Structures are given as C-alpha cells and as structure tokens.
C-alpha cells in the first residue's frame, strides 16, 4: 500500500485508539492534516511543551492508554522535561519530536542541537526514525515498550526539524497490535513454588501489613487486593501512587505510608512483623527513606519487574508476576482460618487509625478563616463524586491529599505528581480528555498552578471541563519549615521573599480567560462551589483562600 508517513502515522495512532494528541506546533504538520482527513483524533495545541507532556501523562494515567505529545526540534527539551514525572510514575507516554537531518547536521542549523541524549534518562526507549519505511515498526515498538512490563515513556525523533520525513511515501501497511494499546498488554503468571513460599510466610505472620503501590493500579488489581486483605485479615497501606487501590473508607486501609503520608500508616507499618510489598519499588518516598519499615524487617515482594524484587529490602520470598494474577492466585490458595491469628493485630491497627482520626478531627472540621487545607481535603472526601478522577500536585498538595483525603469508592481514581510541582493542573486536563464522562477534580497549591496558568486558555478553547481547586496561600509555604531552619529558627522579611508571592485572585484570572472562576473564603462555602463547578460542564478554577501558616504534619512523629 503506497502511503505517506503522515497518512500512515495518522492511521496507526487512530488504530491504537488514540483520541487526543497534545503538542506545540510546528511538528509533523502533514500528519495533523491527515489526522483531520482520516481520523477523529483531536489535536490540542498547548502553551508549552512541558504542559503538553503533562496532559499526555494525565491522559495515560487516567485511561491506561498511551498519551501522545509532540514538539518540534527547538521545543524538544521542554518536552523531555515534561517526561520526567511520567518516567518516575511509570506512565506510558509517547513523545514525538522533530530532529536533525543527516544532510545538514553539524552546520549550525537554526534552533538545532542533538536532543536525543537528553531523552535517555527519562525514557524506557529513545530512538530515531530516519526513513519513512521505518514508521510502521518503530511506532509499533513505541506502543509495545510504553505499555509492557513496568510502563513508561518512549521518545521517537523523526527526521527533519519539524519531522518532515512524514511527507515521504513508501509501500507500508498501518498494522496495529491492539494488545499494546493499553496497560497491561501481558499478565505474566508467577512460578507456583515461589507463590506458595510467599503465602506460607503471610499465613504464619501475626502482624503483617501489605504495602500496595502503583503496580496494583496499573494491573487493575484493586479488588483482588481488597479481597485478599479481607480473607487473611491483613491491613493495607499504600504508596501515594497506589492510594486508589483500596477505598479510604475501607476498615483495613491504614492510609498512605512514607513521606507524604498519614501518620497511622507509618505507625502500622513500623509495628508490623512482616511487610508484603505488592507493585511498589519500595522507594525512598514510600518508605520515608527506608525507615518505615526499617531495613531488616521480614519482607516479601510481588512485582512485574525482576530487578525491583529485593532491591530495597532483603526478602524472605519474592514473586515475579502480574499483580492481579498473583493476588487472585493467593486468594484461591489461602487458608482463611489463619486470619484468627491476627485478631489482636487488627484491633491495635484499628486503635491506631482511630487515634489518627481523633487527633485530626478538629482540623478536618475547622471553621477557621483563612481556610485550613485539612478542611478542604475533608470537604473533597465528602463531596467528590464516587466515579471521579482526583489529581494532586506534589509538595504540600501531595502531603495534604496523601494524608487527609479519603477516596470513598473503588470507582474513584487518585493520580498524583511523582515530584514535579505544576504537574497536576495540565495532567487534570489530560485526564478529562481521556475520560470525558467522569468528573475530574484537581488539588494544587498556587505555586503549582502558576507554572502552567496559560493552559486555562487551552481548557477553555477545547472546553475541557476539569475542576481545579487551588489551595491559595499566596506562597509556596511547604518551603517555610526549611527556610526557618536555614535562618536559624527565625525568618526575616527578606527571607520570606524566597517563598512568598503576591496575592492573586485566580477566580478572576480564570473568569477573564473564559473559564468558570469561583472564589471561596469561608469553609462553609466550599461544597457549594464544588457542586457548581462540577455541574457547570466548563473548565473551572475554585480559588480557596487559605492560611499561610498551615503546615502539613511531618510523616513520622517520635
Ligand atoms: C519542578 C519542581 N521545582 C521545585 C519543587 C520544590 N517544591 C516543592 S513544594 C514547593 C512549593 C509549593 O507551593 P504551593 O504549590 O503553592 O503549595 P503550598 O506549599 O503553598 O501549600 C516547591 C517549590 C518541586 N517539587 N518541583
């Protein structure tokens, strides 16, 4: 079949089920023209390449389908910067850029450097497409790598600063392997012996805890996780990335463990006599730099990546396989009568969780003005619809939402920035593109929103009806504690210049840009604003005026 690269690429992306691409022009221009002629794919041009990458990332995490973002040669590193969070979060993002032409490279071509090495640390696969005949196999490999194993970003650089290789023609077939159009394409089954060994340790333990991570959500294994925890009476802590694997309201859920966490989860994991890691790399964030649990505590681990099993904790048993398959096999084989061994443990776990709730009750219900962030989290726990996708930025936003927010239903999704401030707002727009039928509610600080404020205009232009809640304290006050320390305990007015901003009414900014802008100054008004925003079917910014002195509790209290 004689096709241009542009025609083939448009057909293949449609074949893989891509509904939106996020980019800053000008790259693959002919491909965009062919998308319009041949497909239903929406082509969203954004105000920055990093935001485009974050939108693709939010799209990918919300749907499990690869998110596609693009940039021309001079925007390539801006796009690479945006892949860093997807890489850390194991999110299947596919990035296309324009790149150097062998006919002109090394001649000081306008805007050009060798971008390829910069993609190396933020991708699972980083490759160049130099001949149009290679489009079909390279695109298939991009989807294969992005979705398989532990998912992650992929970069293809197309020849020509704008990827003009897409103009050329060849005999090509737009063959699509739909298996790789979403995560997970494979569900590897574990070795039965290794699973048996793990189960026997689990059954014998008296104070076990499961630590569930993003691998459980990627595998769609939340219900198997909950069923196993119930069958064996094992409390579940999650990483921030795995927060939606078990509803916040489930009696066995002790909360998010680690640094951006809930104190009850850290106390339970610290008191456990066995840690069972499932779909988590047990990295620094989830273990509060390998102190919760302490290294040396008996541990077992299930993961789809062989090199993750045992990397951070010496193991009594390790199992290689898909989380959903492993958990359902454990459920089938387990001896439910062993649960009685853990009744004491479950009572003390409940007491720890109740203590946390009592301790935070006042803050969660606070009527204070300016508003306390804990109250916003409590309002969100109560009023966000059961099928919503909730996103949280990092820093303080991650601490507040990791610790204080509860999902109410297995149908609710929770997506979080893996460390980059400013990720959540554009990621929320991408999530809404991926799941237009689901409510999307993003929680961010004002410093986080500032990064990609211009994307409010993108949301208005495409009527992306995501709701963004801004914890607006006119500062990046997570940094306050650190600067207090740096200044020997007391800050000067000059010191505050390092982390405070002007007071801005983001509801007004949003209104001026054509979105729905709502400002909330009193806690009692929040739920009405949230309902109005969700009902409006428009992009909405809820600007909440909060207390600059509110600092999230530290992960571990001595
Ligand atoms: C790309 C990036 N740069 C810097 C940081 C460091 N950082 C973490 S939180 C924070 C300030 C957060 O401010 P805001 O979003 O307003 O929330 P607040 O702390 O005020 O609640 C900064 C600068 C980061 N996480 N990511």
Image (spheres, rainbow, N blue to C red):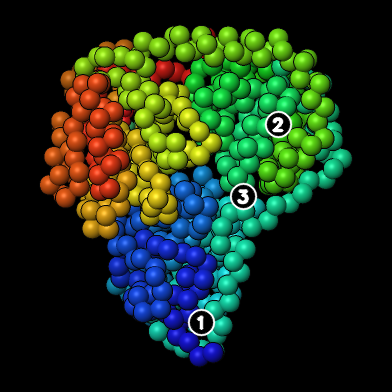
Of the pair 391 and 298, the residue shown nearer to us: 391
Residue 423 visible, this orientation: no
Give the number of the disc on residue 131: 1
Number of marks in picture: 3
Cα distance in 3D space between marks 3 and 1: 29 Å
**Residue tagged 2:** 228
Residue at disc 2, secondary structure: helix
Mark 1: give few (<14), some (14-19) or many (20+) Cα within 10 Å. some
- How far across and down, in percent of the image, does residue 131 sit? 51, 82
Task: Label 1: state its secondary structure.
Answer: loop
Whether the residues at callouts 2 and 3 have beta carbons within 8 Å, the answer is no
C-alpha distance separating marks 2 and 3 = 23 Å
Residue at 26% x, 14% y: name it. Answer: 367
Left/right placement of residue 122 relative to residue 186 reads left
Mark nearest the camera among 3 and 1 is 3
The residue under label 3 is 150
521 to 345, vertically: above or below: below
Residue at 19% x, 24% y: name it. Answer: 521
């Amino acid at each position: 079949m004689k096709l241009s690269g542009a025609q083939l690429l448009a057909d293949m992306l449609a074949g893989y089920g891509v509904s939106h691409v996020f980019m800053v022009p000008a790259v693959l221009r002919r491909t965009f023209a062919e998308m319009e002629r041949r497909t239903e794919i929406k082509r969203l041009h954004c105000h920055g390449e990093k935001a485009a990458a974050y939108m693709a990332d939010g799209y990918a995490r919300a749907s499990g389908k690869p998110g596609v973002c693009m940039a021309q040669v001079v925007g390539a590193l801006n796009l690479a910067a945006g892949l860093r969070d997807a890489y850390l979060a194991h999110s299947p993002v596919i990035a296309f850029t324009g790149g150097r032409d062998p006919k002109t490279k090394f001649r000081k071509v306008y805007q050009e450097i060798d971008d390829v090495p910069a993609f190396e640390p933020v991708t699972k696969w980083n490759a160049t497409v130099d001949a149009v005949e290679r489009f079909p196999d390279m695109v298939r490999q991009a989807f294969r790598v992005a979705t398989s194993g532990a998912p992650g970003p992929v970069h293809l650089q197309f020849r020509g600063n704008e990827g003009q290789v897409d103009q050329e023609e060849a005999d090509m077939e737009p063959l699509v392997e739909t298996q790789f159009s979403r995560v997970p394409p494979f569900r590897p089954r574990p070795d039965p012996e290794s699973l048996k060994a793990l189960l026997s340790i689990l059954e014998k333990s008296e104070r076990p805890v499961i630590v569930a991570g993003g691998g459980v959500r990627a595998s769609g294994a939340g219900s198997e996780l909950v069923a196993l925890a119930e069958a064996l009476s094992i409390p579940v802590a999650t990483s921030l990335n795995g927060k939606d694997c078990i509803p916040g309201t489930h009696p066995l859920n002790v909360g998010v463990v680690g640094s951006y966490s809930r104190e009850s989860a850290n106390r339970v994991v610290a008191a456990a006599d066995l840690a069972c890691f499932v779909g988590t790399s047990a990295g620094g964030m989830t273990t509060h730099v390998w102190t919760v649990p302490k290294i040396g505590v008996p541990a077992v681990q299930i993961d789809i990546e062989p090199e993750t099993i045992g990397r951070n904790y010496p193991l009594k048993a390790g199992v290689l396989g898909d989380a959903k398959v492993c958990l359902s096999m454990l459920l089938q084989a387990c001896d439910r009568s062993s649960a009685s061994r853990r009744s004491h443990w479950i009572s003390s776990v409940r007491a720890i969780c109740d203590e946390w709730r009592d301790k935070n009750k006042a803050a969660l219900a606070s009527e204070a003005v300016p508003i306390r962030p804990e109250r916003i989290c409590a309002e969100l726990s109560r009023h966000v619809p059961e099928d919503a996708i909730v996103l949280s930025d990092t820093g303080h936003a991650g601490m507040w939402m990791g610790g204080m927010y509860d999902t109410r239903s297995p149908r609710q999704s929770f997506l979080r920035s893996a460390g980059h401030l400013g990720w959540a707002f554009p990621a929320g727009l991408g999530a809404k593109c991926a799941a237009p039928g689901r409510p999307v509610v993003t929680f961010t600080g004002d410093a986080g929103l500032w990064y990609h404020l211009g994307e409010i205009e993108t949301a208005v232009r495409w009527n992306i009806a995501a709701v963004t809640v801004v914890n607006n304290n006119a500062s990046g006050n997570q940094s306050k504690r650190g600067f207090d320390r740096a200044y020997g305990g007391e800050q000067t007015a000059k010191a505050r210049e390092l982390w405070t901003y002007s007071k801005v009414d983001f509801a007004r900014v949003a209104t001026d840009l054509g979105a729905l802008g709502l400002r909330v100054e009193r806690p009692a008004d929040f739920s009405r604003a949230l309902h109005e925003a969700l009902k409006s079917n428009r992009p909405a910014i809820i600007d909440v005026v909060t207390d600059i002195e509110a600092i999230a509790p530290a992960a571990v209290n001595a």
